[in-house]
Amino acid sequence: MDSSYGLEWQSGLLGPQPVWTVEPSVEVISKIAYRHLELLADEIAHTTVEFQFEGCLNKLYAVECPRGSYFMRITLPVHPHFKTSSEVATIALLQSHTSIPVPQVIASSSTSDNELRFEWILMERIHGVPLADIWASLAWDTKEACVKEVARITAQLFELRYDSIGNLFNAKDLPVRSERANRDDVTGSDTVVLDRIVSTDFFWDRHLKSNVHRGPFASSKAWLEARFQLKEEDCIRVLESQDADETDIDDMEEAQKLLKRLRKQLPIFFPSHATDREEFALHHDDINDHNLILDSKGKLQALVDWECVSVMPLWYACQTPLFLHTREREESPRSEPELDPYDDDDYERMDLRGCFLGEMARLAPQWFVEHEKSKPKRYFSQALEMCNGVYHQPVKIWLDDVEEGETECKLRNV
């Protein structure tokens, strides 16, 4: 079985992007859904399966039948087996050990060795709408209540502690367990184990075939070293390519210089002699306003999209959710006539970010302390991510300040 069936990486403005080369068969999707929902012949006659939308890595199909509403999500083989397997195991753990609202998984296939030839997950459909669709129409009190609910979810994730960096899996789904794979510290059983990491950094384009260490990682420094290796390999690949143009070469040469400067700062931001024992927690790094599903009254119904959710260092896990990230603005009245159309929303999300942080300080004081003290480490990680041939200037400015001893300075994003 071709592990890359249906997937092609094509160059784009922001680098390689995954493209579907084969359209999943709706007929086969329907048969799979009928079988796993155990539908009778008369129920099948009143069942519809329709394409809903396509994301970066997945296609979503709606299954409507007399027994209920479901989603069938088909995934590209960007990280065969492990991406699907980890997501299913993570959702199962959340359902058994937290009150976080997540979709119920009905069935799944973490192998493409099936009639569809793609991995898939069949799950219940959460009725509601994405926060993004109704944000502008929501009253302040409703937005504030939603933010506080997300804080409660974040606090629960923060309590799920582990002893290394990686992803969660059902032990039976791992063909070979990594040397450092260990039992799940939350359940205390061997059923769920922490193993290799599943993240875009490690499977994007040619990264999946790199000989880089994939975890579990015993320390932040080991994880960052692996990310450095992937970035450096990207530079070498472009510089040795016969197809690289002058702009590509200039960008990668600049990236190499920045990576070299940044690597020198690694022992300063992450000293090997640090006496504090590192802790790690489960972290959902994509809590955006499309993954928060609300009902008609604006009450949160579910947080979806648990693929690539990893156990991360506390300094990394203690971040504000993506839907509260915005352009930084000075504190000033939102009624100023000269403000552009986006500023009202920027100020509002800034205020709500303050609400979120206040709620986290109340619910999980350690999270708030870690969030405040770990900003330099997060800037370092962000600078490493931005050494990709596109966003060099902010990293150069930040490194200039850091090399002058200003390790607390902020990395300004573009």
Image (cartoon, helix red, strand yellow):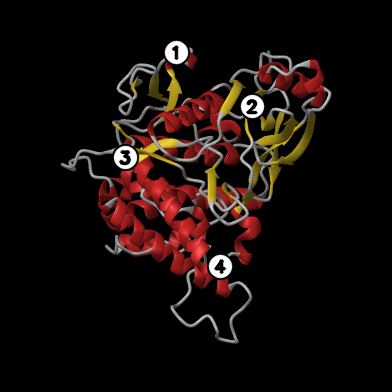
SS for callout 2: strand
SS for callout 4: loop
Q: Quadrant of residue 307?
A: top right
Give the Cα distance between marks 3 and 1. 28 Å
Q: Residue at x 20, y 38 (%)?
A: 277
Amino acid carrying label 2: it is Leu
Q: Residue at x 43, y 33 (%)?
A: 94
Q: Position of residue 397 (x, y in %)?
A: 43, 64
Give the Cα distance between marks 4 and 2. 34 Å
According to the picture, the residue beneath numbered tag 4 turns out to be: 139
Q: Which mark is residue 176?
A: 1
Amino acid carrying label 1: it is Val
Amino acid carrying label 3: it is Glu
Q: Residue at x 39, y 65 (%)?
A: 354
* Residue 289, above or below 204: below
Give the Cα distance between marks 4 and 1. 51 Å
| Circles 3, 2 touching at the beta carbon (< 8 Å) | no
User: Which of the two marks, 2 or 1, is nearer to us in this view?
Assistant: 2
Amino acid carrying label 4: it is Ala
Of mark 3 and mark 1, the one earlier in the sequence is: 3
Q: Which mark is residue 122?
A: 2
Q: Quadrant of residue 117?
A: top right
* Residue 231, above or below 194: below
